[in-house]
Image (tube, rainbow, N blue to C red):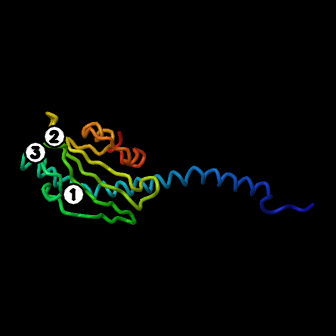
Amino acid sequence: MRVLKGFSLIELMIVVAIMGMLATAAIPAYQNYTLRTKISEVISLASAAKLSLYDYYLSQGSMPLTANNESAELSAVANLELSRIVANNAAVYSELSGNTDISSLTVTISGAGSAVDNKIIIFTFDASQTSGLKFYCDATQAVSILNASVTNYVADDYLPSQCRS
């Protein structure tokens, strides 16, 4: 009687099927992970603008009234180019129609992936609370504070945990 060495065709097909099932779960999870990493990079680079606004608020006692980067003492950066992603108009300052306690920075993402391309991240600063200057980076807070109707913001799935609704 002859002893067979190796795997049978059925065994190999089972292994390939198991690998396929694992890949269907792993690939989307990895793609979400890479998008979250890129968005975190944008948020950390926009923190320089956040610090400029904090400094301005602490020295002046209010947010800048005019809605432009120069009055907010922000550098006039047109684009932030990160590892193959571009944050267009990176940190565009705006204030809430004459309200010196509420303002926002808006960053538009492109080149990161179809799930977040042409989406925005809104950083909202709210000093109207008695507890001091608050910073929000989730869209739900931004929409309620700014009374805006923004629909093209980055989904919570791709934001870091401190920016999720």
Nearer the observer, 112 or 100: 100
Residue at the extreme top of the image, as rendered: 130
Nearer the observer, 121 or 27: 121
Residue at image position (23%, 44%) is: 135
Label 2: element kind: loop
Residue at image position (40%, 66%) is: 84
**On residue 123, which mark appears?**
none
Image location of residue 58, percent across then percent down = 9, 48
Which residue position is annotated with label 1? 48
Which residue position is annotated with label 2? 127
Image location of residue 39, percent across then percent down = 37, 54
Q: Amino acid at mark 2?
A: Ala
Q: Are marks 2 and 3 in contact (CB under 8 Å)?
A: yes
Quadrant where the image shows the N terminus:
bottom right
Image location of residue 13, percent across then percent down = 75, 55
The earlier-in-sequence mark between 2 and 3 is 3
Which residue position is annotated with label 3? 62
Give the answer, above or below, for where 76 lies relative to 141: below
Label 3: element kind: loop
